[in-house]
Image (tube, helix red, strand yellow):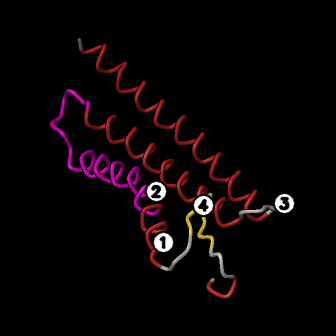
């Protein structure tokens, strides 16, 4: 059983790092699209880049937190628990950002479309 736990620790750490790197790659790409070539929705791409960056940080923290938490020779560390709580909060952050953005857009009389606020009257923006 000890070997299984040791193997599981390394698998979870490696998965967290790999998934975090994939999310970081997506964040860099979204930021590049927002600022690089002509885009019809640069604000939406920046929004996606921020989301991906939060998910990358959450993945790294979750991998490290689980790696520390699953140690057999020592009790659960406070660092592991803080890392896991931070990972959960970072995972929820993009959804909270979208809710706040869409809510403030709808309150101002706009329409939330493609991760940006669209106003029917150009002077309202």
Quadrant including the C terminus: bottom right
CA distance for labels 4 and 2? 16 Å
Q: Secondary structure at mark 3?
A: loop
In the picture of the structure, the residue carrying the numbered disc 3 is 37
Q: From this view, report whether residue 106 is shown above or below residue 47.
A: below
* Chain-order first, disc 1 or disc 3: 3
Q: Does residue 91 show up magenta in the picture?
A: yes
In the picture of the structure, the residue carrying the numbered disc 2 is 94
Q: Does residue 106 show up magenta in the picture?
A: no
Q: Nearer the viewer, mark 3 or mark 4?
A: 4
Q: Are marks 2 and 1 in contact (CB under 8 Å)?
A: no
In the rendered image, the residue lying farthest to the bottom is: 123
Instruction: Compare residues 39 and 36 and report the one nearer the observer.
Output: 39
Q: Secondary structure at mark 1?
A: helix
* Chain-order first, disc 4 or disc 2: 2
Q: Residue at x 34, y 54 (%)?
A: 89
Q: Position of residue 77 (x, y in %)?
A: 21, 44
Q: Secondary structure at mark 2?
A: helix
| Mark identifier at residue 106 | 1
Q: Residue at x 66, y 59 (%)?
A: 45
Q: Residue at x 34, y 34 (%)?
A: 67
* Chain-order first, disc 1 or disc 4: 1
| Mark identifier at residue 113 | 4
The residue stretch that appears in magenta: 70-97
């Amino acid at each position: 059983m000890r070997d299984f736990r040791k193997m599981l620790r390394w698998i979870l750490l490696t998965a967290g790092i790999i998934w975090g790197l994939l999310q970081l790659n997506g964040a860099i790409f979204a930021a590049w699209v927002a600022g690089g070539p002509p885009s019809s929705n640069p604000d939406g791409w920046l929004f996606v880049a921020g989301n991906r960056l939060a998910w990358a940080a959450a993945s790294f923290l979750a991998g490290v937190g689980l790696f520390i938490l699953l140690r057999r020779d020592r009790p659960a560390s406070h660092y592991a628990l803080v890392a896991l709580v931070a990972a959960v909060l970072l995972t929820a952050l993009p959804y909270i950002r979208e809710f706040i953005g869409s809510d403030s857009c709808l309150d101002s009389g706009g329409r939330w479309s493609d991760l940006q606020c669209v106003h029917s009257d150009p002077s309202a923006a």
